Image (cartoon, helix red, strand yellow):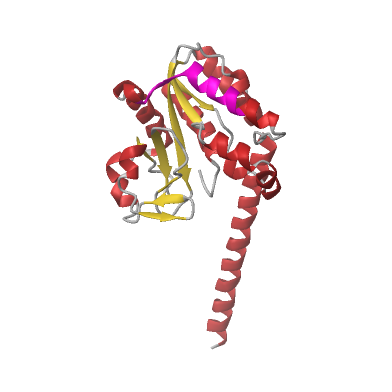
């Protein structure tokens, strides 16, 4: 995976990894609130604050059948996202699930102090080595508060013991945490009820949130690709000018 991606995009790739492993589904319970436009944030600040207090993602320890895996690979990006959204979860209400948050695209590890997930996946500039750990243990290493985030000033080396090899390693780490940290699990119906309550309160106030569409994610990827191409063209132009200057001398 190259360039900056959103947490939702990364989680969808995490579902791809689960298919390779043959176990686990990761659901987008709350959309990427940081992806809201300025107008959306101004229009529904109370709803955004309320939704931010609900864990945005959760892992369910589901065995994947060959038919499910084949069906997943046959779907387009938008259909996959819909299958992992609140409207199409289709899990038993009594099933324990593992809520988690994703923090990514930061030069140093950061935590959102409002989030309530007990597990956090931190992804730095080297996206091939994500960190998957209990939020409280990462928080203990955060020594400064900047803006709206706790920052681990020692940097990514401080989280080395929790790093895993790639996105498939992250999928396997979530499965291990599900088995080993029963205190961090929540029943699916509890999470669902929290979402219903917050949604009703937002609706009463005339507020709402919108789940990013596949088109939105594609546009963001294309924008990042164009920026990368411009950077490459500028670098190529500088090299050519240096070569011409060197030849002239």
| Residue lying at the far left of the rendered structure | 161
Q: Is residue 238 above or below residue 182?
A: below
Q: Is residue 196 above or below residue 127?
A: above
Which region of the structure is painted magenta? 184-198
In the image, 230: left or right of 135? right
Q: Is residue 148 magenta?
A: no
Q: Residue at x 50, y 16 (%)?
A: 189
* 132 or 144: nearer the viewer: 144
In the image, 18: left or right of 152? right
Residue 167 visible here: yes
Count of picture labels: 0
Q: Residue at x 41, y 42 (%)?
A: 122
Residue 8 visible here: no
| Residue lying at the far bottom of the rendered structure | 249
Q: Residue at x 71, y 48 (%)?
A: 39
Q: Is residue 1 above or below residue 95?
A: below
Residue 244: % across, % down: 58, 80
Quarter of image, res 135: top left
Residue 138: % across, % down: 33, 43
In the image, 179: left or right of 22? left
* 25 or 31: nearer the viewer: 31
Quarter of image, res 116: top left
* 66 or 100: nearer the viewer: 100
Residue 154: % across, % down: 31, 55
Residue 219: % across, % down: 68, 44
Q: Main secondary structure of the magenta part?
A: helix
């Amino acid at each position: 995976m190259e360039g900056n991606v959103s947490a939702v995009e990364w989680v969808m790739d995490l579902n791809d990894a689960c298919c390779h492993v043959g176990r686990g589904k990761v659901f987008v319970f709350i959309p990427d609130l940081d992806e809201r436009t300025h107008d959306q944030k101004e229009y529904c600040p109370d709803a955004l604050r309320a939704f931010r207090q609900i864990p945005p993602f959760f892992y369910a320890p589901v065995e994947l059948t060959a038919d499910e895996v084949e069906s997943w690979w046959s779907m387009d990006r938008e259909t996959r996202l819909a299958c992992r959204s609140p409207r199409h979860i289709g899990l038993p209400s009594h099933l324990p699930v593992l809520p988690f948050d994703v923090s990514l695209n930061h030069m140093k590890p950061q935590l959102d102090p409002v989030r309530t997930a007990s597990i956090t996946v931190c992804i730095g500039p080297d996206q091939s080595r994500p960190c998957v750990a209990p939020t409280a243990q990462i928080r203990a290493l955060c020594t400064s508060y900047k803006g709206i985030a706790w920052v681990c000033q020692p940097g990514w080396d401080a989280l080395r013991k929790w790093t895993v090899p790639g996105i498939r390693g992250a999928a396997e780490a979530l499965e291990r945490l599900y088995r080993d940290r029963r205190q961090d699990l929540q029943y699916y119906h509890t999470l669902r009820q929290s979402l219903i309550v917050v949604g009703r309160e937002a609706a009463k106030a005339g507020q709402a949130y919108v789940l990013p569409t596949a088109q939105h994610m594609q546009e963001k990827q294309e924008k990042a690709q164009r920026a990368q191409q411009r950077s490459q063209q500028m670098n190529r132009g500088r090299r050519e000018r240096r070569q011409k200057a060197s030849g002239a001398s």
